[in-house]
Image: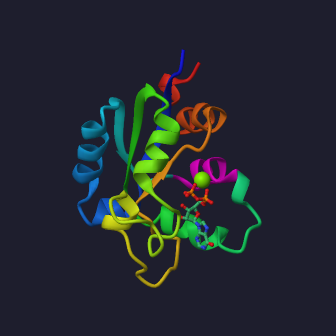
Amino acid sequence: MTTERSLVLVKPDGFGRGLTGEVLRRIEAKGYVLVALRITTPTAEMLAAHYAEHQGKPFYGELVDFMSSGPVTAIVIEGNQCIPGFRSLAGATDPTKALPGTIRGDLGRDWGMGSTENVVHGSDSPESAVREIAIWFPELAG
Ligand code: IDP
Ligand code: MG
């Protein structure tokens, strides 16, 4: 059984530019199912947990400042192999290098913060997805 769930975020740049609908459209057009959706401005505690693997990296401070700068749309999606599948839809981390046809390639660019502003987040493994869904949707955990 390969049905799985992934945690997707429309980051503050994407939310602020009104791209939530376009991201949802691509997820639904791909065929993944929307399980839960919430608009929220993340707390410092949520971001410290979400980005724990990146603590200590040179871009960490800028990343957390950016992610707490405004609302994000948090989404849980479901479908066979939706974790790698959404990563393919999202494209490369750096929106300048992300290929056309991907969310980051079509909708993102360098606005002066390099790779930090890149429209979306997607879980990178089943373990990350479980951990991240518990942060953004504690009611779904367990
Ligand atoms: P991912 O989002 O493609 O999985 P990660 O390496 O997990 O990329 O990095 C998490 C987030 O941190 C990225 O989405 C991006 O917002 C930011 N980031 C990653 N690498 C850099 C960098 O080299 N400079 C600035 N920001 C970065
Ligand atoms: Mg990542």
- The residue shown at (61%, 48%) is 50
In the image, 13 versus 86, the foreground residue is 86
* Residue ranking furthest to the bottom: 112
- The residue shown at (26%, 58%) is 19
Where's the C terminus, which quadrant?
A: top right
Q: Position of residue 55 (x, y in %)?
A: 73, 60
- The residue shown at (65%, 72%) is 59
Residue 99 sits above or below residue 80 on the image: below
Where's the N terminus, which quadrant?
A: top right
In the image, 50 versus 84, the foreground residue is 84
Quadrant of the picture in which ligand 1 is shown: bottom right
Count of marks placed on residues: 0
Magenta region: which residues? Answer: 43-52
Type of colouring: rainbow
Q: Position of residue 128 (x, y in %)?
A: 63, 38
Left or right relative to 29: residue 103: right
Q: Quadrant of residue 78?
A: top left
Q: Is residue 21 magenta?
A: no
Q: Position of residue 130 (x, y in %)?
A: 60, 31
Left or right relative to 83: residue 49: right
In the image, 1 versus 20, the foreground residue is 1
* Residue ranking furthest to the top: 1
- The residue shown at (43%, 79%) is 110
Q: Is residue 46 magenta?
A: yes
Q: Position of residue 30 (x, y in %)?
A: 30, 38
For the stretch drawn in magenta, the main secondary structure is helix
In the image, 49 versus 89, the foreground residue is 89
Residue 81 sits above or below residue 124 on the image: above
